[in-house]
Amino acid sequence: MLKTIVIGACGQIGTELVLKLREIKGAENVIAADLKVDCPEVLKGGPYCKMDILDETLVREYIIENEIKEVYLLAALLSATAEKNPDFAWKLNMEGLFTILNLAKEKHIDKIFWPSSIAVFGPTTPRDNTPQYTVMEPSTVYGISKLAGERWCEYYHAKFDVDVRSIRYPGLISYTSLPGGGTTDYAVDIFYQAKLNVPYVCYLKEDTSLPMMFMEDAIRATIELMDAPKAAVKIRSAYNLSGCSFTPKELASEINNYIPDFKISYAPDFRQAIADSWPKSIDDSAARKDWGWKENYSTSELVKVMIENVNTDLLK
Ligand code: AKB
């Protein structure tokens, strides 16, 4: 079995991706790598490496020496955190990508997954059913880095036959690990407050509709895209991907079906402008056509699973 590494393994996507890949490929074949010195309990079932993606020498040596052939590069600053530290966000989000793209160009790596985001779109993009190909003028550092990354992925594929694959993730909803630093994080935080019987103060306005997806769908999409035959992957920038769309008010009302006393209020902050620049819903027909994507979870289905599984001990 070829060796796989997930860089940024302790994050919201990384944790669940490592667990699923270990199930499929065998725990010993999937290395979790992250900045943390100690491996978190949940990832202890397989190999762990403390890795700073910005340490190019270490990353290169580790990947070459361990003959790692598949890389999932998830280490990044998300939209809200990136606005607070633009220089570092640009450095982190771009330099790591080049290190991995160059390793693939030199034929050390066979296949790369690198996540893009709905943040590649901006205020001039059509917001309803946003097409795969459309105006892209992102107004956040994160969005600019993701759009630049997409262009570099396509370039490395076209010029050097690098097999890099990518998805424009919407906001991701999960209960295994907490999100950090995104604009869509409210849609996870809200469940913890609801389960603690605490009113939730949302940093977005009640009618802010954003594309979202349950993590199980996102992980399945990622693995299906990586497993698709090379020729089927026609888009080498990143695929639009849709799950469901909802507003904070709609989400709170779904939660009220399970916790009738739960209350939400609204105090928009700087993240409102970010959300206002993003799509409300996504046209993902290219992903459906090229590699057979179809989501499983609607808003009400993901709310049910979140209510059943969110464990507030994770906040400790
Ligand atoms: C964020 O909110 O920054 C992320 C994203 C949509 O990429 N969840």
Image (cartoon, rainbow, N blue to C red):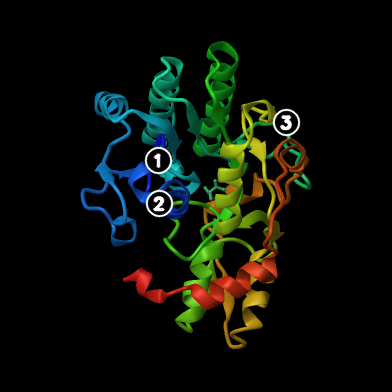
Q: Which numbered mark, 3 or 1, is in the foreground of this view?
A: 1
* Mark earlier in primary sequence (2, 3): 2
Residue 189 badge: none
* Mark earlier in primary sequence (3, 1): 1
Residue 186, image x, y percentages: 53, 62
Q: Which residue is mark 3?
A: 135
Foreground residue among 153 and 291 = 291
Q: Which residue is mark 2?
A: 11
Residue 134, image x, y percentages: 75, 32
Inter-mark Cα distance, 3 to 1? 27 Å
Pointer 3 with pointer 1, Cβ within 8 A: no
Vertical placement of residue 209 versus 264, above or below = above
Pointer 2 with pointer 1, Cβ within 8 A: yes
Residue 75 badge: 1
Vertical placement of residue 5 versus 303, above or below = above
Q: How many numbered circles are shown?
A: 3
Foreground residue among 220 and 193 = 220
Does any portion of residue 122 appear in the rendered image? no
Residue 147, image x, y percentages: 58, 30
Please tell me in which quadrant of the rendered image residue 301 appears: bottom right
Name the residue at 62% across, 77% down: 255
For label 1, the SS is loop
